[in-house]
Amino acid sequence: MSSSSYTPDTDLWLERSRLDGMTLGAVSYGMLLLLTIQATIALYRRGHGLGTQRSLLLGYIAITFILATIGFAANVRYTEMIWIDLRNAPGGPVALIQNEMNYWINLMALSCYYVMEWFMQALLLHRCFVLWGGEKYIAIPMTLLFLTMVGLSIVVLAQASGVVFYNIQVQLAYLCIEVGMTVAYTLLVTWRLLRFRRQMEGLVATEHLRTYDTVIMMVVESAAMYSVLGVIFIIAFAVHWNVTNLVFLAISHVQAIAQLFIIIRVAQGRSVEAHPRAGVCTKSIAFATYKTEEDPAQGSNGTESTAVGSWKQGEIVEEP
């Protein structure tokens, strides 16, 4: 007897995609766990130069990890329900996968991941504000995008109970706003850093300009991880393709991983090489607002500016 005779009359691709998606979610959660531990240790051991930001980053890491853990545990439990606890339910595993929002445990998981996204996007927003010095033409649009994202996620949660998740059209708008905000952040930060780099050309040696190159690469690499998955998820969600199951249970973990990479590299000072030179300490990155005093003979009382550099604790050491 051929093995094909044992194949049940069901949507095997849907079931496989859901189970494979849970496996990818478990792998990404394992990576998140390891990086959370590494980031926490790095901030405790070498994050003293970050000042009060260290406490905020530790709080951010703790909150996002707790939310991810609750969401992941709920997804694991529902996976058990699909193929073990409720396998004889009407419609079988296919009906349980399609009607997952009929169960409170999935609503809880979705809520945890949404709140987790709020914190991750808020961190991006903060970095963008610091880098652009709170410029209104940047702060207002980015804040509106953030508030729109939060509002849409609340609407999705309000509509999710008892419906097929992929039929919620507001979810598609939410995904577009969220990924669009990440892409906008990446473009704004990259353009700002490139502008700072051009201003420094001719003023410092070429090797010191690598500080900016390294930060740009770090920002682009971390954003690319999430943005690629986000675009795939949007396309799959829009056409009701089962690939959404491969991405959905891991995408929030991937975004958190990207954020932790930046936190770890900044805390450990590995994102910039130490180039000792007279008057400048180049052992860590700092996003800082500082005041420069001009020569009184030039008739200036000083200017306040925002910049990114490699100054220890956000300070410039004056040359003797």
Image (cartoon, rainbow, N blue to C red):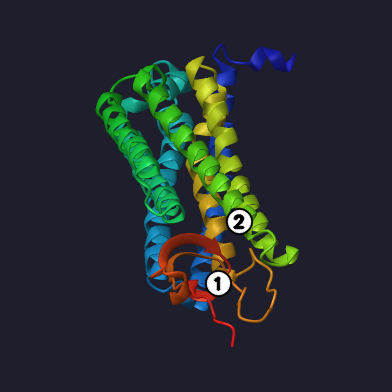
Q: Position of residue 237 (x, y in %)?
A: 49, 21
Q: Which residue is mark 2?
A: 199
Residue 83 placement (x, y as % from top left):
48, 30
Give the residue displayed 44% in from the left and 53% down from the top. Answer: 127
Rendered view: 1 above or below 244: above
Q: Is residue 63 visible?
A: yes
Q: Secondary structure at mark 1?
A: loop
Which amino acid lies under the numbered mark 2 shown in the image of this protein? Gln
Q: Give how far apart the Cα atoms at labels 2 and 1 are.
A: 17 Å
Q: Is residue 294 left or right of residue 309?
A: left
User: What residue type is disc 1 on?
Assistant: Trp
Specify the quadrant of the image occupied by residue 114: top left
Q: Residue furthest left?
A: 158
Instruction: State whether residue 46 is above or below residue 114.
Output: below
Position of the N terminus, as image quadrant, is top right
Q: Residue at x 57, y 46 (%)?
A: 190
According to the image, label 1 marks what residue? Answer: 311
Above or below, comparing residue 145 to residue 216 in the picture = above
Of callouts 2 and 1, the N-terminal one = 2
